[in-house]
Every structure is written in C-alpha cells, then in structure tokens.
Amino acid sequence: MRVIAELPHPECKITLFNMNQKYIVKFEQGTLEQSYKLSELDLSGGGANEIFQLLDEDFITTVIERFKTMRKDFSEAYKRQQY
C-alpha cells in the first residue's frame, strides 16, 4: 500500500492510499478510523484530485459525526463490561 497524499483537516487525519488498482481514503481520529475504497475504474482519470473533490465539507462533516457515534458506541460497550 502506497501513500498518495494527505489532506489537511483540523478534526481528523485524511490519507489517500493506492493499492491493487484501488484508492483507499482513510480518516483517523484518535484511536478510531474509517476507510472508503474506490476502484480506479470508477474514476474518470483525475486521480487524487478527483477523489479530493468527492471529499467535500458535507461528506467530511458526516464522517466527523460518525466518529462521535463510534466513540459513544464503543464507550457504552466498554461500560457494560465493567459491571
């Protein structure tokens, strides 16, 4: 897996990878991560720039909200095991 680019964002780390004719977009926030895979064949040839156009603020806001849900879900599961 090869790192293609990183997109700066104040709330999470966004990294674009390339592996086996797929692009992988990974979002990281603390110990949590989300990844999205796109086939090179599904794109029109714009590479990293085309993918970064898909990652508009509306999409990134949804990803950030999903991190909050993930953190809450994990915290609740952890608390259930403590009692």
Image (cartoon, rainbow, N blue to C red):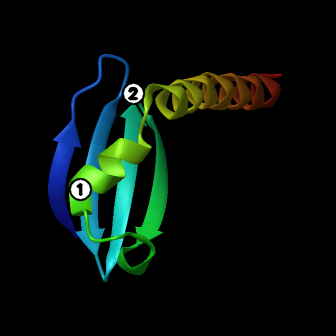
Q: Which mark is residue 1?
A: none
Residue 29, located in which quarter of the rendered image?
Answer: top left
Which SS class for mark 1?
helix
Q: Residue at x 23, y 51 (%)?
A: 49
| In the depicted structure, whether residue 33 falls above or below residue 21 | above
Closer-to-camera residue (80/24): 24
Residue 40: where, in percent of width, then height? 35, 75
Closer-to-camera residue (41/72): 41
Residue 7, located in which quarter of the rendered image?
Answer: top left
Closer-to-camera residue (70/22): 22
- Left or right relative to 68: residue 80: right
Residue type at mark 1?
Answer: Ala
The single residue placed furthest to the top in the displayed view is 10
The residue that label 1 is drawn on is: 48
- Left or right relative to 10: residue 43: right
| In the depicted structure, whether residue 40 falls above or below residue 51 | below
| In the depicted structure, whether residue 64 falls above or below residue 47 | above
